[in-house]
Amino acid sequence: MYQLTIIFNENELKKRGISEDKYMNKIKEYYNTHDVTEVEHNVFQAMGEHAAVSLILPIIDLTNKDFEFIFLLDKCEAILGEEIDDIIEDTIWWYKERGYKVRNISKCCTI
């Protein structure tokens, strides 16, 4: 069983005039076609060979399309078997490793 929890930063959403639905609708649309179940508000579970990829892929896709997305999140945590993975931290690390300038997590970034 794999699980992903997504918690948005309400202040950042308000500041930018965005609702979490803008993103969650896209994520849920993807999950509906990939056997991912919402077990609580913005807590999703999947099982099977490709479960981890199914949970994380829409987050990666949204971040690749709009890096600002990652800064709208307070928490994006995946439980992959016995590992707990901080997707926000991993994403910022990935971009920095590739030479992108990323300011601290509470600010927007420059790509």
Image (cartoon, helix red, strand yellow):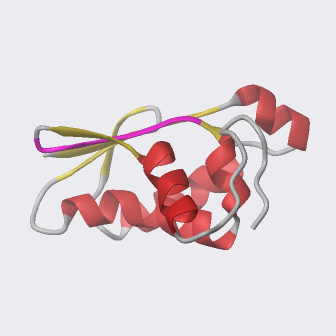
Residue 89 falls left or right of residue 43: right
Which image quadrant is residue 39 in? top left
> Where residue 23 sits: x, y (%)?
64, 54
Magenta extent: 74-81
Which image quadrant is residue 20 in? top right
Vertical comparison of 48 with 43: above or below: below
> Where residue 4 sits: x, y (%)?
34, 43
Magenta segment includes 106 = no
Vertical comparison of 50 with 91: above or below: below
Which image quadrant is residue 44 in? top left
Point out the image quarter for the C terminus.
bottom right
Vertical comparison of 66 with 105: above or below: below
36 or 81, nearer to the observer: 81
Magenta segment includes 76 = yes
Please tell me how many numbered marks the rendered image carries: 0
> Where residue 16 sits: x, y (%)?
88, 43
Residue at the (66%, 39%) spot, across then down: 105
Residue 107 falls left or right of residue 78: right
> Which residue, as the protein is rendered here, is positioned at the far top?
11
> Where residue 64 sits: x, y (%)?
60, 71
Residue at the (10%, 67%) spot, across then down: 49
64 or 23, nearer to the observer: 64
30 or 96, nearer to the observer: 96
Classified by dominant secondary structure, the portion drawn in magenta counts as strand
Residue 35 shows in the view: no
Residue at the (78%, 38%) spot, across then down: 13
Residue 10 shows in the view: yes
Vertical comparison of 41 with 46: above or below: above
Residue at the (82%, 45%) spot, across then down: 18
